Image: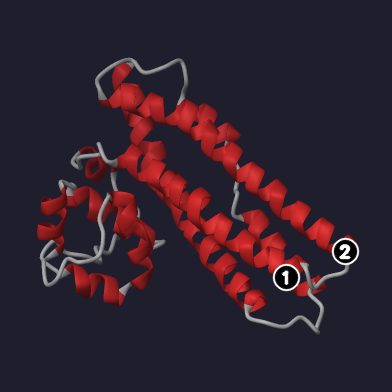
Amino acid sequence: MNEIIYDVNIKMSEMITAHPGLATMLGRFGLSLGFGDKSVKDVCASRGVSVDFFLLMCNVYNNESYLPSMDDLLATDMSGLVPYLQLSHTYYAGKRLPHIEHHLHHIAEQMPQRVAGVFMRFFAEYRDEVTAHFHYEEKNVFPHIVSLQNGEAGTDYRIKDYLAAHSNIEDKLDDLLQIIFKYLPQSATGDDAVDVVYDILQLSADLKKHALIEEKILVPYVKTLEKKMS
């Protein structure tokens, strides 16, 4: 049975305090800090965000066992789904990855040149893979969803093609961590190593949550829209 963690009348500050990981999600809804003692319902209303959609995403993000029913999805205003996913891409590619890369450059300076070259090349390949993954979704998946939401037949694309092309971009972050653990010289100094390990762990956890949202919300929702239009 699903456990509903959040309620529309809880204070937004209390919800974020109880589950700090949700703070990183706010910007993906177009929300920001500075909500005082307002409830989740009032904060969402003041920013034009569907509170049902907001809570649905938070429940999936923060509870791996939570599985929304199809009735839940169809009863929710899902117009914010594509903007949320687009802003998630912007957050990962525009903020988190450059932040990690900055620390990695400092770490690489303390490695033997040959190892540093392999180290940075591995990260560059990962960054390119993530960028390609996001570009694929933005070019194919997002326009398809918007068309279906507008009551159109959609594009020739089908969500089954997304499933076939989907890759677990968080897996390579775990590989990067193992490279750091294996090759970082014991003589390495400064906080960069600790900071980047923490950042990678945080990003990996966030990407896993992102994948859950795609698996539990995006895919079944789009399948249902496609079925309606067939």
Please say if the residues under marks 1 and 2 sit with CB atoms less than 8 Å apart. no
Residue at mark 1? 107
Kind of residue at badge 1: Ile
Residue at mark 2? 113
**Residue shown at 14%/59% (left/top)?**
43
Q: Nearer the viewer, residue 27 or 64?
A: 27
| Residue 168, x across and y down, in percent | 60, 48
| Residue 103, x across and y down, in percent | 64, 67
Kind of residue at badge 2: Gln
Decide: is 146 above or below 69. above
The number of numbered discs placed on residues in the rendered structure image is 2
Q: Which mark is residue 2?
A: none
**Residue shown at 20%/40% (left/top)?**
77
Q: Mark 1: which secondary structure?
A: helix
Decide: is 221 above or below 72. above
| Residue 15, x across and y down, in percent | 24, 71
Q: Quadrant of the N terminus?
A: bottom left
Decide: is 184 above or below 47. below
Q: Mark 2: which secondary structure?
A: helix
Task: Say whether residue 137 is left or right of residue 144.
Answer: right
Task: Say whether residue 127 is left or right of residue 54.
Answer: right
Q: Quadrant of the C terminus?
A: top left
**Residue shown at 43%/44% (left/top)?**
214
Task: Say whether residue 213 is left or right of residue 13.
Answer: right
